[in-house]
Image (tube, grey):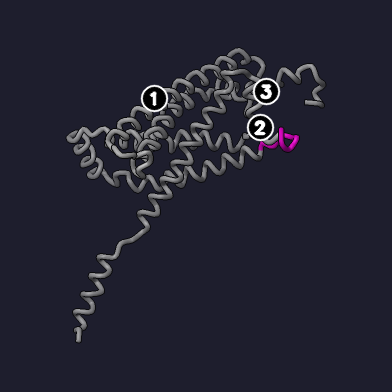
């Protein structure tokens, strides 16, 4: 018959060896929210860059997301709902990511020394992701709040006015680099972490993924800079006509009541 001490010791051993599933579950939620935000980032850049095609193309995309071509009328509340969803995912992802940050100066110093000693590229990429993520806490939060409060102020003239006359372009410029670097690195690390596209040669696949990651990052940074420059140009040219909403060329000869 087991003594009381043996029973207590046995219980203590079971409790010590029992593994919690919560860290894995939180990692899964963090990965899923990061994937959602990364793909949304690429889609968002593709949509706003339609200004490079024409003002009409950008207006058409804006009205499409406001439901005009399906509902017969624009509803900026749809945009606000999307922004609210992205904001929730952004906060959730940020809170979960903070678990991996150094908790104090000693941990930071230890990580920095190991990074310098190992000179491992993926470790450096994580460090870039950590710093850009920290920057996004401030930069992306401001942008999301502004869009949540003014979801109807999107369009060729409206967006250009915000960028140039309202002087948002410095924030957008820094935000562009932070979000593209953070998102690109994050999606690459997700593919490596969960073994996506691993194939028969994981090392070769990782090398290809790195090249693809940098190629996509350069592409979206270039696209973003050209897009920002286009909005700045339109805003500068129309700086004396603030508040004017864009009317597409096909409606310009129609009475305003039919727009």
The residue lying furthest to the front in this view is 200
* Residue closest to the eye, 138 or 207: 207
**In the figure, 182 relative to 50: above or below?**
below
| Residue lying at 23% horizontally and 40% vertically, measured from the top left | 111
- The residue that label 1 is drawn on is 215
Instruction: Choose between 1 and 148: the one closer to the eye.
Output: 1
- Point out the image quarter for the N terminus: bottom left
Residue in the image at 50% along x and 23% along y: 169
Residue 206 is left or right of residue 112, and the answer is: right
Q: Is residue 70 magenta?
A: yes
Q: Secondary structure at mark 2?
A: helix
Question: How far across and down, in percent of the image, does residue 242 sit?
Answer: 65, 20
What residue is disc 2 on?
Answer: 64
Towards the viewer: 163 or 44? 44
Say whether marks 1 and 3 touch (CB < 8 Å): no
Mark 2 or mark 1, which is nearer to you? 1
In the orientation shown, which residue stands out farthest toward the top?
A: 237
Numbered disc 3: secondary structure: loop
User: Quarter of the image holding residue 199?
Assistant: top left
57 lies left or right of 23 = right
* Distance (Cα) linking label 1 and label 3: 39 Å
| Number of numbered discs on residues | 3
Q: Which residue is mark 3?
A: 243
Q: Give whichever of discs 2 and 3 has the lower sequence position.
A: 2
| Distance between the alpha carbons at the discs numbered 2 and 3 | 22 Å
Choose top left, top right, bottom left or bottom right for residue 6. bottom left
């Amino acid at each position: 018959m087991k003594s009381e001490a043996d029973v207590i010791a046995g219980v203590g051993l079971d409790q010590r060896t029992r593994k919690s599933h919560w860290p894995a579950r939180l990692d899964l939620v963090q990965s899923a929210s990061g994937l959602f935000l990364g793909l949304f980032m690429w889609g968002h850049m593709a949509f706003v860059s339609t200004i490079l095609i024409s003002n009409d193309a950008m207006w058409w995309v804006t009205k499409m997301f406001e439901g005009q071509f399906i509902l017969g009328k624009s509803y900026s509340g749809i945009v606000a709902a999307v922004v609210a969803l992205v904001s929730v995912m952004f906060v959730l992802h940020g809170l979960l990511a903070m678990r991996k940050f150094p908790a104090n100066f000693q941990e930071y110093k230890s990580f920095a020394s190991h990074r310098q000693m190992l000179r491992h590229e993926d470790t450096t990429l994580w460090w870039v992701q950590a710093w850009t993520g920290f920057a996004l806490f401030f930069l992306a939060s401001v942008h999301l709040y502004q869009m949540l409060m003014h979801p109807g102020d999107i369009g060729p003239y409206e967006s250009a006015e915000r960028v140039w006359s309202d002087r948002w372009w410095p924030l957008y410029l820094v935000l562009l680099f932070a979000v593209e670097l953070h998102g690109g690195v994050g999606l690459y690390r997700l593919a490596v972490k969960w073994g996506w596209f691993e194939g028969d040669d994981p090392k070769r696949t990782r090398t290809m993924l790195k090249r693809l990651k940098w190629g996509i990052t350069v592409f979206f940074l270039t696209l973003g800079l050209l897009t920002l420059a286009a909005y700045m140009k339109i805003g500068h040219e129309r700086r004396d006509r603030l508040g004017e909403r864009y009317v597409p060329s096909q409606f310009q000869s129609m009475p305003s009541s039919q727009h």
